[in-house]
Image (cartoon, rainbow, N blue to C red):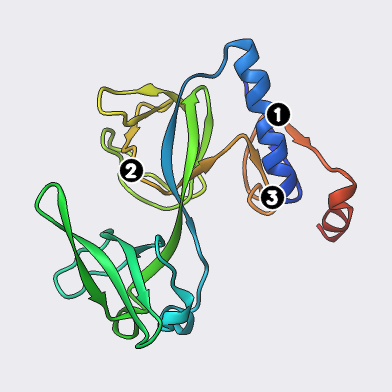
Amino acid sequence: EGRRPLVVAPTHFEGRLLREQIRAVMKAQGDLKDERPVEVLREIHMSAADRSDWRQYEKGQVVEYVQRTDGTEAGTRRIIDSVDREIGHVYVKVPVGATQSATHFLDIEEHSDKVRVYEARTLMLGTGDRIRINKNGAPVYGKTKLKAGGYYTVTGFDEHGDIKLNNGMTISKSYGHIAQGATSTSYAAQSKTVDHVIIVASTVSFAAVNMQ
């Protein structure tokens, strides 16, 4: 019928296995094409107290500003370059020109309520994939704002590698706040309106199913 069901897996572990199987079938049927790696961000949930503690930080993590501060605009991202564990300082990479960067001290105590911390991951994405938006934002092309919790189908990529969606929007390949949307947990599926729902549960998730 051309309709997509909502596939619900009670646990993230089962969801990951199920997504792999769904995508393998789509590839075999020719419904998933032109795969390419896209960098995405997974939030490391921390309290403000945690974000002010240098021991919570590791090299390679991504810090994103959620408020403007000291001339740094909201939405700006910095990659943690190093953590000096002798003096408890965190240093980030700051772009200098088009191709170079410098290392700056990040005052985590001052900025703990103005930043969020993420782990950078690589997501294989292709035409035909379903994605979920994890944070409100703006597309590269399109008047509709991106809303957290929204599900879309990838219809292709433009000449810059930006991601085209089935509602006509194009989002930047560096948007970051997206995830595979082929499956959903029961918690994330709440309040969603769909044509069909398929619930997949194994013995691994019996406890989770009983709770929900």
Q: Are marks 2 and 1 in contact (CB under 8 Å)?
A: no
Q: What amino acid type should be assigned to the residue bearing mark 3?
A: His
Q: Residue furthest left?
A: 97
Q: Residue furthest front?
A: 86
State how far apart marks 2 and 3 are (Cα): 24 Å
Q: Quadrant of the N terminus?
A: top right
Which badge, 2 or 1, comes first in the chain's sequence? 1
Question: Please, what secondary structure does the residue beneath circle 1 have?
Answer: helix
Question: Please, what secondary structure does the residue beneath circle 2 have?
Answer: loop
Residue at image x 69%, y 50%?
12
Mark number for residue 38? none
Residue at image x 41%, y 43%?
39
Q: Place residue 94 in its image quadrant.
A: bottom left
> Mark 1 sits on what residue?
21
> Mark 3 sits on what residue?
12
Residue at image x 44%, y 73%?
57
Q: Quadrant of the C terminus?
A: bottom right
Q: Position of residue 159 (x, y in %)?
A: 25, 22
Which badge, 1 or 3, comes first in the chain's sequence? 3
Residue nearest the observer in this picture, 134 or 121: 121
